[in-house]
Amino acid sequence: MSPQVLIIGAGLSGLACALKLQAAEISFFLLEASDAPGGRVRTDEIDGFLLDRGFQVYLDAYPEAGRILDLPALDLRPFSPGALVFHRGKMHRVMDVFRRPGSLVPSALAPIGTISDKLVNNVCVLSDVSRAYAPPGQHLISVSVLGLNDRPDLPAAVIDELAAWFGPEVRAWRHLRTDRIEHALPEQLPGGGKFPSLTPGLHRCGDYLTSASIEGAIVSGHETAESLIRHFHRTT
């Protein structure tokens, strides 16, 4: 028997759509171009390190994500609500003063932006948040670079910049992998919502249709599945 629905892409939206169709007993076939599911939230293990394909932040107020994700199994860990910002040759600590009231004075005095608009850093030590990200005695540092930079010396250029921030010991760090992630953060203008149905029988889903987030991807997958479920109920 041929499946009723063909889903192309096993990222969060495609998987959320598939789960909802399965619950409605609608048959589907799920296709994925890469060698494993997950899309931009996929994690790979290399030499004992856990490498996320994208830097993802999960907010515990996400309603749809909270309903379908096995949060205890994910063993989520919180980041400190702030950042170290490199500015004019020095590091400045800027914190969320609503969650860390004691940091109000140093955050306000930091020479970056204003109290209501502070910069954030694009380097994080994931193994400080969760020890599972690195083998014992080692650390995993994730660096985000804006744009799809194809220069062959990109890892060396990043090391040069980080050495100016953290010192010459950075040059002893080992480069594990560079991921170039297209459409990592979809541009979304006010009032730019898109509808999942393109033509009769052809639908689309993805966080670019709702909000560029884990929640947005899941919501979009659910909305597409609900549209398909209504269609099959009308035709049966």
Image (cartoon, rainbow, N blue to C red):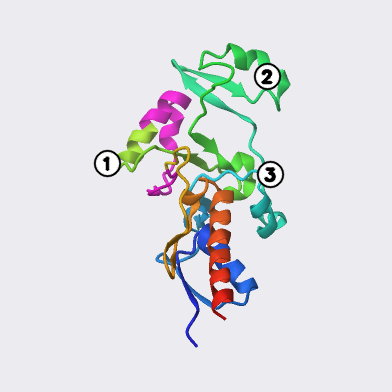
- Percent position of residue 137, x then y: 59, 44
Look at 64% across and 31% down and name the residue there: 81
Q: Nearer the viewer, residue 69 or 95?
A: 69
Which of the 4 quarters of the picture holds residue 60?
Answer: top right
Q: What amino acid is labelled 3 in the image?
A: Ala
Mark 3 vs mark 2, CA separation in Å: 24 Å
Q: Quadrant of the C terminus?
A: bottom right
Q: Position of residue 22 (x, y in %)?
A: 61, 73
Q: What residue is disc 3 on?
A: 61
Residue type highlighted by circle 2: Ser
Q: Which residue was labeled with disc 2?
A: 103
Counting other residues with Cα less than 10 Å from the Cα at mark 3, is it few (<14), some (14-19), or many (20 or more)? few
* Mark 3 secondary-structure assignment: loop
Q: Which residue is mark 1?
A: 151
Q: Is residue 211 above or below residue 115?
A: below
* Disc 3/disc 1 C-alpha distance (Å): 39 Å
Give me the disc on residue 14: none
Q: Is residue 234 above or below residue 83?
A: below
Q: Earlier in the sequence, mark 2 or mark 1?
A: 2
**Closer to us: 43 or 162:** 43
Q: CA distance from mark 2 to mark 1?
A: 40 Å
Q: Residue at x 61, y 39 (%)?
A: 128
Range of residues picked out in magenta: 160-186
Query: In what element is the residue under mark 2?
Result: helix
State the residue at coordinates (44%, 16%).
89
